[in-house]
Amino acid sequence: MSLILGIETSCDETAAAVLADGRRLLSNVVASQIELHRRYGGVFPEVASRQHVLSILPVISQAMEEAGVGWDDLTAIAVTYGPGLAGSLLVGVNTAKGIALGRDLPLVAVNHLEGHIYSNWVDPVRPGDPPYQGARLSEADFPLLVLVASGGHTELLVMHDHGRYERLGGTLDDAAGEAFDKVARLLGLPYPGGPAIQQAAEGGDPERFPLPRALLNAPEHRFDFSFSGLKTAVLRLARELSDPVPVADVAASFQAAVVDVLVSKTIQAAEACGARHVCVCGGVAANRALRAELRKRMTLPYSIPPIWLCTDNAAMIACAGHYRFQAGERAGWDLDVIASARLA
Ligand code: KG4
Ligand code: ZN
């Protein structure tokens, strides 16, 4: 049996999870800092790293306790080394190193984006719930086409095998989640913008304002994205319409534009690379409109994690760590954070 303790501190959630056999979650603890950063309208890096320092040990203890396991039971510790905020990553990496050294456990370094991808490999049931009986991803589903849409990244990748990725394209400017966050701010909605826009868009008319779908038919950028023009278009629209801005319709129209581009390009990329299966992940995968559009338009089989596994968590880091460990990977004591780490 494999028992991996995952640790994640790349941005503003302090998270720890214990995962059995690369599938079964025994615990999954996430201490969110959202309330702390809301007054700044975004993540304040210095505040984030200080809060990680305060939260990390209680979060790890809680994850170990809820899993009902001791240090000697663990197979390895997996920790996010990047990409993310350097000061935040350092807290997770140094804590993981300390425990690994003190308890004589192997350490595995995990790329945060790879973590998001593996959120699709974790059984989608909460710790303590009855065992998952549904369909699972397996090696027979390779090659997978992956869309990672988070606050920092929007990438289309082919996953040929565990740990083997080929990048097809990505955003040329803002990430999809970043666009949600920026548009929310200009509409006067709170941080984080994704859930706020989703809520504001409920009851809004997504067809009222036709907004740009950048690069949708750009042959040289088939698998790239651009969201900064959309953000500017919303800004212009909000200025034109002021007094009062029909927030629900603007939010719904913006959300529809992002979702349309994400789904269209994912489908095109999956066809182009002959994927057997599609995986969607990252914080933006929590979006209900995106999930509905995928249900409507995807013809290939696809996976999307439950909402609680879409945003940052350590279950996905433990899962990616499980496969890296199986492949024989071990991090040394000189493991350093890489704020702009790439996957492929
Ligand atoms: O993956 P994640 O938790 O952190 C990063 O790795 O960046 O993603 C956070 C991003 C934020 O930009 C947030 O606004 C967005 O995901 N997000 C959403 C939703 N929930 C979170 N975007 C759209 N709809 C949502 N329901
Ligand atoms: Zn993330």
Image (cartoon, grey):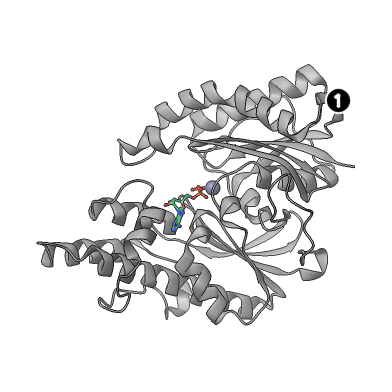
Image location (x, y in percent) of residue 34:
42, 38
User: Looking at the image, how many numbered discs can be counted on the residues?
Assistant: 1
Image location (x, y in percent) of residue 172:
42, 60
The answer to whether residue 50 is above or below residue 204 is: above
Name the residue located 86 percent from the left edge and 25 percent from the top edge.
72
Would residue 224 be visible to someone looking at this image? no
Would residue 317 be visible to someone looking at this image? yes
The answer to whether the beta carbon of the residue marked 1 is less than 8 Å from any atom of ligand 2 is no
Determine the residue located farthest toward the right in the rendered image.
1
The residue that disc 1 covers is 72
Q: In which quarter of the view is residue 158 placed?
A: bottom right
Of 282 and 291, nearer the camera is: 291
Of 256 and 10, nearer the camera is: 256
Q: In which quarter of the view is residue 69 placed?
A: top right
Name the residue located 90 percent from the left edge and 42 percent from the top edge.
1
Determine the residue located farthest toward the left in the rendered image.
243
The 10 Å Cα crowd at callout 1, few under 14, some 14 to 19, many 20 or more, is few
Image location (x, y in percent) of residue 299:
62, 82
The answer to whether residue 301 is above or below residue 10 is: below
Three-letter code, disc 1: Asp
Which image quadrant: the C terminus?
A: bottom right
Relative side of 301 to 72, left or right:
left
Name the residue located 41 percent from the left edge and 54 percent from the top edge.
195
Image location (x, y in percent) of residue 10:
54, 38
Residue at disc 1, secondary structure: helix
Name the residue located 45 percent from the left edge and 34 percent from the top edge.
33
The answer to whether residue 211 is above or below residue 178 is: below
Relative side of 250 to 42, left or right:
left
